[in-house]
Image (cartoon, helix red, strand yellow):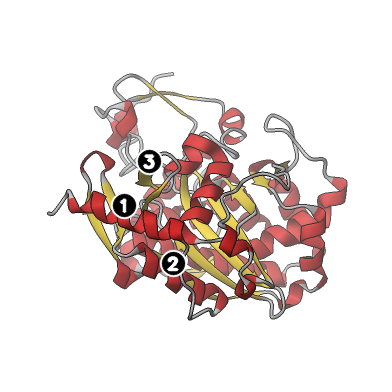
Amino acid sequence: MSINYDQRNFCEDGYAARKGRKKNNKAAKVVIFAMELLVIAVMAGILWMVTRVAKPDEGGIYRVDFKPGDDLKIPEPVKQNAEMKGYMNIALFGVDISNEKTDMSGNIVDLLPAEKSRKSGLEKGFRSDTIMIASVNLDSGDIKLVSVYRDTLLNVGDTYSKCNSAYSTGGVEKALKMLNSNLDMNIKDFVTVSYWALSEVIDSLGGVYIDVDKDELKHLNNYGICIGKTMNVPYIPLAKPGKQLVNGIQAAAYCRIRYVGNDFVRTQRQQEVIQAIEEQAKKADLNTLLNAFNQAQDDICTSLKTDTIIPLLKNIAKYRIVETGGFPKEDLRVVKNLGAKGSCVVPTDLERNVEWLHEFFFMDSDYRVTGGVQEYSNQIRQIVSKYPN
């Protein structure tokens, strides 16, 4: 099947914009993001006992097991840190699962079967275009979310690169190691979703309320057309700006907007949608949540187990998102072109950023970073010093 680009020029950074580009430099794909922990916990916990653990090519939620002895690069001082006791830290990943088939020049010539593309890449093989950390205070129920900007220059195992490359080159295990070793964290669990899950959950909840600015409206509708074609479902455009009920594809399109504000503003939109999902989920009845889980389970990958989820469910009403943030911190980052590495978000001082993160999550104003973070911070400074402009 040949794609007629003249018929697809509405996709501003999608299909038509890829014409003439090399395959490894395709225009930005659909931005996917992870759903908020509370929603996942509610849905997964309700049906866990009646849903079989699945492999990637089967139906049902896909669970990845980490054994107790698996090395997730949690620094030893962090394991012993008393200030972090009583918190549950979970990584939330959104992966870019594309079903496009391109030629050597990057032109789209066909679409892979949607079912095949949506069920691959949840554990590895695709960049995690959205990375968040949810820290849950198990005593108070407070949830704090921090987005780790996807282009942040960090130690990614064997090189210093954009942090979202960890997921594509080594799967979720490498991504967790990257977060733990660079940020002095003790993350052992994760949830990964595709935009299929995002759209399905929001539609099952009856939509979410989003405040769309006038400048965002055109771009939201353009992205919605693209996402609808990828998912092979019709797209219903929004007619006007303002706070309104949007469906799953419209919400996913809102998260994808790149041309109103920068990537940091786009992350704020993602967090806005997450909070909107939380609000709707808390108002939903049991049957609605059951339906949402049934619709989305094929598009969720997680390490969460029943004995992890059940304690959360016992007091689910008390859990709430109380604060959000972004890493690196605004006054401790710059955007810089680093040659072959491209345009990166550079933590100007990784040590101070990690200290801020621990104060934000755990109210530990006296935290001092490990030797590993000190080493990574020095290496980042040396790399950036080679690009003075």
| Residue 336 screen position, x and y as percent | 22, 54
Q: Residues within 10 Å of mark 3 (few under 14, many from 20)?
A: few
Residue 9 or 56: which is nearer the viewer?
56
Q: Secondary structure at mark 3?
A: loop
Write down the residue under mark 1. Answer: 379
Disc 2 + disc 1, Cβ < 8 Å: no
Q: CA distance from mark 2 to mark 1?
A: 15 Å
**Percent x, y for residue 172?**
57, 43
| Rendered image: mark on residue 159 | 3
Residue at image location 35% in from the left, 19% down from the top: 103
Residue type of the residue flagged with mark 1: Gln
Q: Which image quadrant for residue 248? A: bottom right
Return the residue at label 2. 354
Q: Which mark is residue 337?
A: none
Are there few (<14), some (14-19), or many (20+) residues within 10 Å of tag 1? Answer: some
Tell me if residue 218 comes above or below residue 297 in the rendering. below
Query: Where residue 121 sits in the image (x, y, percent)?
Result: 56, 35
Q: Is residue 147 left or right of residue 49?
A: left
Identity of the amino acid at label 3? Thr
Q: Which image quadrant for residue 61?
A: top right
Residue 238, given in percent of the width and then of the height, sits at: 44, 59
Residue 21 seen from this side: yes
Q: Would you place residue 70 above or below residue 75 in this image?
A: above
Q: Residue at x 42, y 59 (%)?
A: 373
Q: Mark 2 vs mark 1: give the one in front.
A: 1
Residue drawn where x is 44% and y is 59% of the image: 371
